[in-house]
Amino acid sequence: MSNTATLVYDGKQYELPIVVGTEHEKAIDITSLRADTGLITLDSGYANTGACRSAITYIDGERGILRYRGYPIEELAVKATFVETSYLLIFGELPTASQLADFRALLAEHELIHEDMRHHFDGFPPNSPPMAILSAMINAAGCFEPVFMAPDDDEHFMESAARLMSKVRTIAAASYRKSIGKPMNYPRPDLRYTANFLHMMFSRPHRLYEPDPVVVEALDRLLLLHADHEQNCSTSTVRMVGSSHANLYASVAAGVCALWGPLHGGANVAVIEMLTKLLESGEKLETFIERVKRRDAGVRLMGFGHRVYKNFDPRAKIIKASCDALLERLGIHDPLLDLAVRLEEIALSDDYFIERKLYPNVDYYSGIIMRAIGIPTNMFTVMFAIGRLPGWIAHWREVRISDSRIDRPRQIYVGPAERSYVPLEERG
Ligand code: SDX
């Protein structure tokens, strides 16, 4: 196997080095391309462009493989917790019992938000999008303890990471309580990460919400499955902002905004909206699929397709199994689940989807689980953000300790050629 690629251009020959990854994936290193040839590359959506070397997550889209720091997602999903997996992603190794205990203690220590932050919620108009609140409140949280905003402070990094993970959960629950006009709940010291979130979401002053262990396990697994996914849009955003040496809170707040888009983390909401519309309209599923194939006004089968996976998204399989188990345990029959299953069957047997290798992705069934738990649809993408937070933190850290250059892509300019200023009176 050659360790260089040959580029022939303008009568000259250039040898470009080949970089090989742990799993033998290969890249052409074009670091010297412009200096040597005057050329840059152009790659819409970066579908063929590696932005970095990373040791955090590996995806093989053709074989439907996903591993966090080398551990298969199928193993972590059944053997690990979200907090344990977060530690693995951020620090690179599964924690020992004492490391896990210390990390949990830091999460507990930082689970409250500053009392003055409670008033920030009053500043948002009713029905403010929870992702707007989340992004704003993450930066606000950084202002209350500036020591954690110092981007290069190694000594505080672990505490800063735990603080952010813990408070994002509290902020999310508080924004929900605010949206339904109910008092915010303080975290309970006797509850762990996910159970405490459910308590903060659903407890009432006169009646504590006692988290059902089955519900806690299903939500904890859902968060774990969202914890990282290499260079997706929002993680790449966090990396890019972090490359300017912006602090962790600013970088993560930017990632929240990128995740918000319906083509990315907002798809879990779009799936439920799509299924609800189908249920209410009674449109035949085969008719809807034909409209998708015709691309009527941008109609897409939301929750299907992926830039990297050209096989089943392994997370979708695990989420579907978890969904079935939870709904059975709770004795819930959700007609949207029936619709989703039938739509999947129709799509997976249709050449349009087969030819384009479109399969269910992480967002296709996740909303059904969250509905069963009682999480409102407008909080679904916030849940994705809570899950993805350890991945964002891990990637921000990887950028900072790699001491890489600031991200600054090039472009091909297609605007007007040089021209002179026209005085206002001569512009017609
Ligand atoms: C996430 O990157 C990540 O890892 C993201 C994520 C993570 O964990 O961070 O996995 C989370 O964002 C999952 C994706 C959630 N989004 C959706 O479910 C929205 C619906 N899916 C699509 O919009 C689309 O599949 C994307 C955005 C996910 C991927 O877009 P690409 O890679 O740019 O693919 P494309 O739009 O170029 O599609 C290729 C072809 C096109 O047809 P042709 O022009 O070749 O004829 O497939 C078609 C598309 O029209 N297509 C779809 C489709 N997705 C792609 N047609 C109908 N329904 C769809 N969902």
Image (cartoon, rainbow, N blue to C red):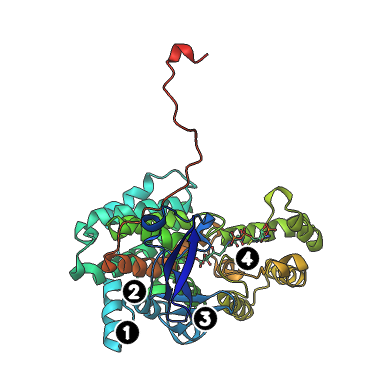
Residue 389 position in % (x across, y down): 39, 66
Q: Cβ–Cβ below 8 Å for labels 3 and 2?
A: no
- Inter-mark Cα distance, 3 to 1: 24 Å
Q: In this view, does 228 lie to the left or right of 273?
A: left
Q: Earlier in the sequence, mark 3 or mark 4?
A: 3
Q: Is residue 187 visible?
A: no
- Which numbered disc, 3 or 1, marks the residue that appears first in the sequence? 1
> In 3D space, how far apart are the residues under numbered discs 3 and 4 (Cα atoms)?
30 Å
Q: Is mark 2 on a helix, strand or loop?
A: helix
Asked if the beta carbon under badge 4 is closer than 8 A to the nearest atom of ligand 1, the reply is yes
- Which comes sooner in the sequence, label 1 or label 2? 2
Q: Is mark 1 on a helix, strand or loop?
A: loop
Residue positioned 41% across, 56% down in the render? 37
Tell me the quarter of the picture where residue 104 sits. bottom left
Crowding around mark 1 (Cα neighbors within 10 Å: few <14, some 14 to 19, many 20+) is: some
Q: Name the residue under label 1.
A: 95
On the image, the x and y values in percent for residue 271 come to: 63, 61
Instruction: State the separation of the CA atoms marked 2 and 4.
Output: 28 Å
* Nearest-to-viewer mark from 2 and 4: 4
Q: Which of 137 and 124 is in front in this view?
A: 137
Residue 107 lies in quadrant:
bottom left
Q: Which amino acid does label 4 sit on?
A: Gly
Task: Provide the residue designation for mark 2.
Answer: 90
Return the residue at label 4.
305
Report the amino acid beneath label 1: Pro
Q: Which of marks 2 and 4 is nearer the N terminus?
A: 2
Disc 1/disc 4 C-alpha distance (Å): 34 Å
Residue 160, quarter of picture: bottom left
Q: Residues within 10 Å of mark 2 (few under 14, many from 20)?
A: many
